[in-house]
Image (cartoon, helix red, strand yellow):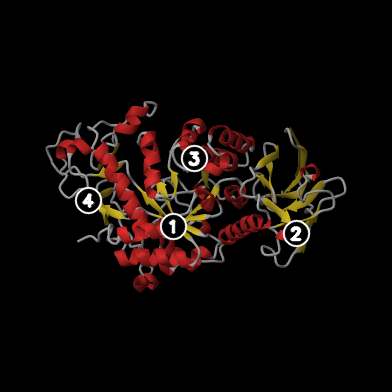
Amino acid sequence: MAPSLLTLATLALWAHHAYAASASDWQKRTIYQVMTDRFALPPSQDSQGAPCDTGAQLPCGGTWSGIENHLDYIQGMGFDAIWISPIVAQLQVPLPPPADGTAYHGYWPENIYALNDAFGTDSDLRSLISAVHSRGMFIMLDVVVNHLATYNVTANADPANPWSGISLTGYSLDEDSEYHPFCPITNYGNQTMVEQCWLGSAAVPLADVNTENQTTVDTYYSWIGDVVSNYTFDGLRIDTLKHIRKDFWPGFAQASGVFTIGEVLDSDAQYVGGYTQVIDAVLDYPGWGMVLQAFQTTGGSMSMLAQSIQNTSTYFKNGGFSVGSFLENHDQPRFPSFTNDTGLIKNAIAWVFVNDGIPIVYEGQEQEYTGGAVPYDREAIWLSGYETNKPLYKHITTLNMARQAAKNGSSSFLTTHMEVISTSTHSIAMAKYPMLSVLTNVGQSASGQVSVAVGSLGNGYSANSELVEVISCSSVKVDGSGNLAFTTQSGAPAVFLPSSMASKVCTNLAASGSGSGAKGAFSTSIYMMSAAVSSVIALVLLVSA
């Protein structure tokens, strides 16, 4: 029998809400996304390194106890929060599975009142949460409200109406009135259809929960309050947010008592931003699309990033503070499936850490995994051996340390919106005191001299001030005219902090280097005026022949 979710809920209620994490608390964090089935095997099996065929879409054996056993690996990169897969009991499909696969991922809930025993026991989950909290870290739970998963078991079911082949026996919602009548989503421009029709397939229809039914609403509000209180989760990631009417969500968020961030899979910033009026934050899908356009190739445009920042400021409740910033997740192809250029990859990852959003890294990015579309982007992390010497593991660690140093160095870092200083086709310079960032998409073959006019920014960037570029750990100095000149190698991003704040990131500072003498030099200059800043970036990038 699956373990219950409601054990000790009443006793834990007052204790959890006494320290429930707020949106401002989460703004201080960086998040590592864990796909429970694919992150770590139970400790008893950890040394065996079980194979995991992503294409088979079968469970590979990851568990809550496995996650707990590898928290050092996560915290070693500087993360102080983790996001785990949904925990509730899942649909069990017969084997061999349909083309959709199985519920290894956790997004096919069947009974919200029971745990997914494939991930472990109630004690295992509590132990994980306790271990996370003992390290001063937060834990975020992924939840699915929009649907319960079903399996069309009746051979003579009407193919146009999968509902006719479904039995609700054993479901947490077992009345027809608790679901919307079956209809496929054929027009995503029709919001009523998006909210009330069904996701899934003919083999695995995802029965759309009737959140217009007040009894059902009360059920979910009560359930989420009990789950959060029972297990002392610090935040929620909400799946398929746009598939439920907006006015359902404020009550749900209030019932949870913790920070909420939702998935709105759409590129329209105005549409996505509307959901920041009903919960704390959303995943930055509009910005993610522009990051891809900027960094997938050396022909991308950095002006897309500037436009993303402007869109977020215009349409999101608190601008960039209302988003979770990401480059990869379990639903999208991994970034290195688009390019193997390390310069582009490192710049794209840096974007996640230098903008206003809460940085989120998906398991496997640090191991340079290259999986494409679902299911190939869901590789087992244990197959990497949890290697901590990989270049991207170190890169992410440095970016986490830099963000931490900026936060500790200035009380205004988390409340100051990032400002675009200048852009060109191949570069963008951004200030978010005390952090100054220059990102490029010239690629790994480019190295050279860069000059940025920063004197007018003030706040520690005045003439003759000392800075440290933390990716290369190079000391640089703003000259008497307020210009910052530095060398970039292999198209790497540049992230600067005042020298007084950089000591914990760079313990042995190197002198600022000079550009190589490679052939094929070209230069670009960028001019951009704003109300507060008039700045210039001049780049002379030396491309190896």
Label 4 vs 3, first from the N-terminus = 4
Residue where numbered disc 4 is placed: 93
Label 1 vs 3, first from the N-terminus = 1
Circle 1 packing at 10 Å, graded few (<14), some (14-19), many (20+), is few
Q: Nearer the viewer, mark 4 or mark 1?
A: 1
Q: Nearer the viewer, mark 2 or mark 3?
A: 2
Label 2 vs 4, first from the N-terminus = 4
| Residue at point 19%, 33% (across, down) | 161
Specify whether 488 is left or right of 112: right
* Amino acid type indicated by mark 1: Ala
- Asked if marks 2 and 4 touch (Cβ < 8 Å), the reply is no
Label 2 vs 3, first from the N-terminus = 3
Which of the 4 image quarters holds residue 20? bottom left
- Tell me the SS state at disc 3: helix
Q: Nearer the viewer, mark 4 or mark 3?
A: 3
Specify whether 484 is left or right of 164: right
Residue at mark 2 to residue at mark 4: CA–CA distance: 58 Å
Q: Which mark is residue 18?
A: 1
Residue where numbered disc 3 is placed: 285
